[in-house]
Image (tube, rainbow, N blue to C red):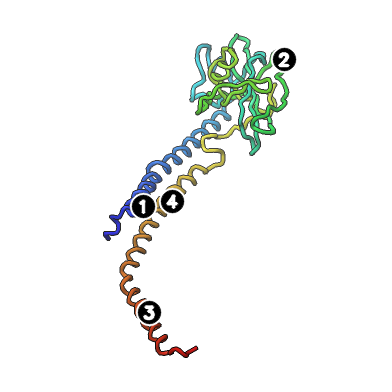
Amino acid sequence: MRFLLRPGWLALIAVVIGFAVAAFTLLAPWQFGREAQREAQQRAIDAASATAPVPFAELVPPGETVTPADEWRQVTVTGTYAPEGEGLVRLRVVEGQPAVEVLTPLRTDDGRIIAVNRGSVAAESGASVPQFAPAPTGPVTLTARLRLDETDPQHRDAIESGGHRQIYASDSRALAAATGVPLEPGFLQLAEGQPGVLRPLDVAPTAGGGAPFTNFSYALQWLTFGVIALFALGYFVRLELLQRRGGPDRRTERAALRRALAGEDESAGPGAH
């Protein structure tokens, strides 16, 4: 077993054990956690869908903001769209195709301003700005879902392209910074049939990437990969041991074969064909 102390074997053992530990203690638990988060979000959506809409000001009084406990709740609000503060959320993907989301501020009857995600619009590419219907003018009454602001992990600045302000997350804070409109934190997500809606966003968990049990299966895969790595290491160690134990016998067989071949050549004589 001294061969295991050689640098190559030590490196292999370290890599395999490190990967197995990461798979068992980090990667698999991370995916299990995301699956639990997805299930909790689905329960919140189901509970919100079973609850009748309430006035926006009742659920989120002036001076307060949308809380995680209120996310996905349905509210009603009356106001007027403010297209001068509109912005696009770029680099979205809907059913495998590039898209943008349209965020348009709504000035409520009591003077508050909140962003409304009117839905998505298909784009030819991630860099193009598609045409879409403008928000209706005049007073509107909306029934929408409360949403918490998203966060762009890279914290990229807004850009101006195609005559539109563009940001990288459905984030009222980023839109307010880009437009100067004093938006309240959070936003409203429109459903089908509401004034100004485009292609409504799906009401489905996003933490797990969409399909049910996706993260659970990923977690099981990481556990399987960790076990396979350990078994593979054991297999290679066993194979090396068998080769080392069988080494002298094979050398003896090769030497005997060489002697036999040499004797055959000698017996054939110089005139043999």
* Residue on which disc 4 sits: 225
Crowd band around label 4 with a 10 angstrom C-alpha radius: few (<14), some (14–19), many (20+): some
Q: CA distance from mark 4 to mark 3?
A: 46 Å
Counting residues from the start of the chain, the first of labels 4 and 3 encountered is 4
Foreground disc of the pair 4, 3? 3
Give residue 238's position: percent from left, percent from top.
Answer: 34, 63
Amino acid type, label 2: Thr
Q: Which mark is residue 137?
A: 2
Amino acid type, label 1: Leu
* Residue on which disc 3 sits: 258
SS at mark 4? helix
Quarter of the image where the N terminus is located: bottom left
Is 224 positioned to the left or the right of 149 in the image?
left
Picture quarter containing residue 137? top right
Q: Which mark is residue 12?
A: 1
Q: CA distance from mark 1 to mark 3?
A: 37 Å
Q: CA distance from mark 1 to mark 2?
A: 67 Å
Counting residues from the start of the chain, the first of labels 2 and 4 encountered is 2
Q: CA distance from mark 4 to mark 1?
A: 16 Å
- Relative to 249, is 56 above or below? above
